[in-house]
Image: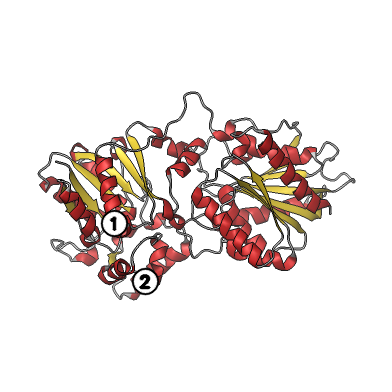
């Protein structure tokens, strides 16, 4: 008989699993939903709860389960106590299920993983406002989307969520999780909620990019399942969630594989055969120069510049940086071969909370480039890629006169629901009105085989652009994937890159 231990996220309790518990028990499983926001046997009262208290309570429950092993399920930030307990009772864990949850690492607190600084500050202010500073009141109804998409949740279920939510002890969100690596060896299943911005296809894309943090997801012990709903499947699709949990317990699901000997996408060859050119490095900025461009200080021709902005997040300790990848070397060299200075920047987008820092890095890089005497400071274009597309928001909202064009390739143009950036200013789909007012041209390269969640942000952007009559040219790439330049070496893909360059350089020279 399978035994499930169901651990909810902040502000919620065992009640949130009610329908799922019923379905699982009808299937013959044992089910133990838990509440970790209030523990009656805590001597100092629930206000003094921290993560270690939650882990201890979860261990007591696991020790009382009659089955020899349990399937330990964590929803969202409920993964912190789940992983902490799994570390201490690995012999009792049959499988860990990450229900629309991330991969917290040793030293991460829940608040550390909230990307938007404004949201973190809001939580801390609310804790202070309680008087004792030790509890965070549950969000009002309009703020629950900050914690995950509510897609599919019926109105009555949402009302119940708001009504039954209880204050969250601050220590459970601020105390770091301590992991030794034991839990990382246990069988695991990720149940991804696609309406919240996660999917198997997106995980495969991330793994293919070669980020070493995610290679663990290719191990045989790891499986993935999807649910076509938002972040709260226990409320929106309880039957489907119960089925997914039973499948997870049986070891079913999709396995992500890395082909033996296959290079990660950034190391593969660029789809165009472009000549090497002189490259100068200044801090985080590389300038790829046309053959005729002389050294700094020489009187001569000034060239337009194209600044290429990579996506991410990119790990701090990555063995190579984006500006040394074949994709960005290829783009910058191609720009130089066409008579423009190609600029690449290693901005510091290491996590979803780093967009402010990255925006500052890009602004500094642009000023450095415009100050170079070989650059025509009045003819600059910015070209954004993938998750770096969010960084286009500031430039679209208030484009300077010297910015002749913004380009974007397979971009993310609105924060995905599970990124925790709903309140941030990095929303190009909401900024396009500024570009319309100045008639700033936008060249958008769209791939046919895009991840559905990213494609939805592009459609949102194009709808907003149509409403405000923005000057947007769409370059479609048939049968191409996200990051197609090192994946899809087709004539159609090569034509799309050439077409996008013709448009961008045309705006620079026009």
Where residue 285 appears, x then y in whole percent?
67, 45
Where residue 357 appears, x then y in whole percent?
56, 55
Instruction: Name the side, left or right, on which 351 lies relative to 18.
Output: right
Could you tell me how far apart the alpha carbons at marks 2 and 1 are, in whole angstroms?
Answer: 18 Å
Q: Which residue is most to the top?
A: 261
Specify the quadrant that holds the C terminus: bottom right
The figure's colour scheme reads secondary structure
Instruction: Name the side, left or right, on which 476 lies relative to 210.
Output: right
Q: Secondary structure at mark 2?
A: helix
Pick the front one: 293 or 82: 82
- Splitting the image into 4 quarters, where does residue 403 fall? bottom right
Where residue 310 appears, x then y in whole percent?
61, 46
- Residue drawn at x 67%, y 44% is 344
Specify the quadrant that holds the N terminus: top left
- Residue 256: numbered disc: none
- Residue drawn at x 20%, y 52% is 23
- Splitting the image into 4 quarters, where does residue 40 fall? bottom left
The residue carrying pointer 1 sits among few (fewer than 14), some (14 to 19) or many (20 or more) residues within 10 Å by Cα, namely many
Q: Secondary structure at mark 1?
A: helix
Could you tell me if residue 408 is visible in this image? yes
What residue is shown with label 1?
A: 234
Q: Is residue 315 above or below residue 233?
A: above
- Residue drawn at x 49%, y 41% is 206
Q: Is residue 391 above or below residue 201?
A: below
What residue is shown with label 2?
A: 141
Instruction: Name the side, left or right, on which 97 lies relative to 504.
Output: left
Where residue 401 appears, x then y in whole percent?
77, 63
Q: Who comes first in sequence, dot 2 or dot 1?
A: 2
Pick the front one: 179 or 143: 143
């Amino acid at each position: 008989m399978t035994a499930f231990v169901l651990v909810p996220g902040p502000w919620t309790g065992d009640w949130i699993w009610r329908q799922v518990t019923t379905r699982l028990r009808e299937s013959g499983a044992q089910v133990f939903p838990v509440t970790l926001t209030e523990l009656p046997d805590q001597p100092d009262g629930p206000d003094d709860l921290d993560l270690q208290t939650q882990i201890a309570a979860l261990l007591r429950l696991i020790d009382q389960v009659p089955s020899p092993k349990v399937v330990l399920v964590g929803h969202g930030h409920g993964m912190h106590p789940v992983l902490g307990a799994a570390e201490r009772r690995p012999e009792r864990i049959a499988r860990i299920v990450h229900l629309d949850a991330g991969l917290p690492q040793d030293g991460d607190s829940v608040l550390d993983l909230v990307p938007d600084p404004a949201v973190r500050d809001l939580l801390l202010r609310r804790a202070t406002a309680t008087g004792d500073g030790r509890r965070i009141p549950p969000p009002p109804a309009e703020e629950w989307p900050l914690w995950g998409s509510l897609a599919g949740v019926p109105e009555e279920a949402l009302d119940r969520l708001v009504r039954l939510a209880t204050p969250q002890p601050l220590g459970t969100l601020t105390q770091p999780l301590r992991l030794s690596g034991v839990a990382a060896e246990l069988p695991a299943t990720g149940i991804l909620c696609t309406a919240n911005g996660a999917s198997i296809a997106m995980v495969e894309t991330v793994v293919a990019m070669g980020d070493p943090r995610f290679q663990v997801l290719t191990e045989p012990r790891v499986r993935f399942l999807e649910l076509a709903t938002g972040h709260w499947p226990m409320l929106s699709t309880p039957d489907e969630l119960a089925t997914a949990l039973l499948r997870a317990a049986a070891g079913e699901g999709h396995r992500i594989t890395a082909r033996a000997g296959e290079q990660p996408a950034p190391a593969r060859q660029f789809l165009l055969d472009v000549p090497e050119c002189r490259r100068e490095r200044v801090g985080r900025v590389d300038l790829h120069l046309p053959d005729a461009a002389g050294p700094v200080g020489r009187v001569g021709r000034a060239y337009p510049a194209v600044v290429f902005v990579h996506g991410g997040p990119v790990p701090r300790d990555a063995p190579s940086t984006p500006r040394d990848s074949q994709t960005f070397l290829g783009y910058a060299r191609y720009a130089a071969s066409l008579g423009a200075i190609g600029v690449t920047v290693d901005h510091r987008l290491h996590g979803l909370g780093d967009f402010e820092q990255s925006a500052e890095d890009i602004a500094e890089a642009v000023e450095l480039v415009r100050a170079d005497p070989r650059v025509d400071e009045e003819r600059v274009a910015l070209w954004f890629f993938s998750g770096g597309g969010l960084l286009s928001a500031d430039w679209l909202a208030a484009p300077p006169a010297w910015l002749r064009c913004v380009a974007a390739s397979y971009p993310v143009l609105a924060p995905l629901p599970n990124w925790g950036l709903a309140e941030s200013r990095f929303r190009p789909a909401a900024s396009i009105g500024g570009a319309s007012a100045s008639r700033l041209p936008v060249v958008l390269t769209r791939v046919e085989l895009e991840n559905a969640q990213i494609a939805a942000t592009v459609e949102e952007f194009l709808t907003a652009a149509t409403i405000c009559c923005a000057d947007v040219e769409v370059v479609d790439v048939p049968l191409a994937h996200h990051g197609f330049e090192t994946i899809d070496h087709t004539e159609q893909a090569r034509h799309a890159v050439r077409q996008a360059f013709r448009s961008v350089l045309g705006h620079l020279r026009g």
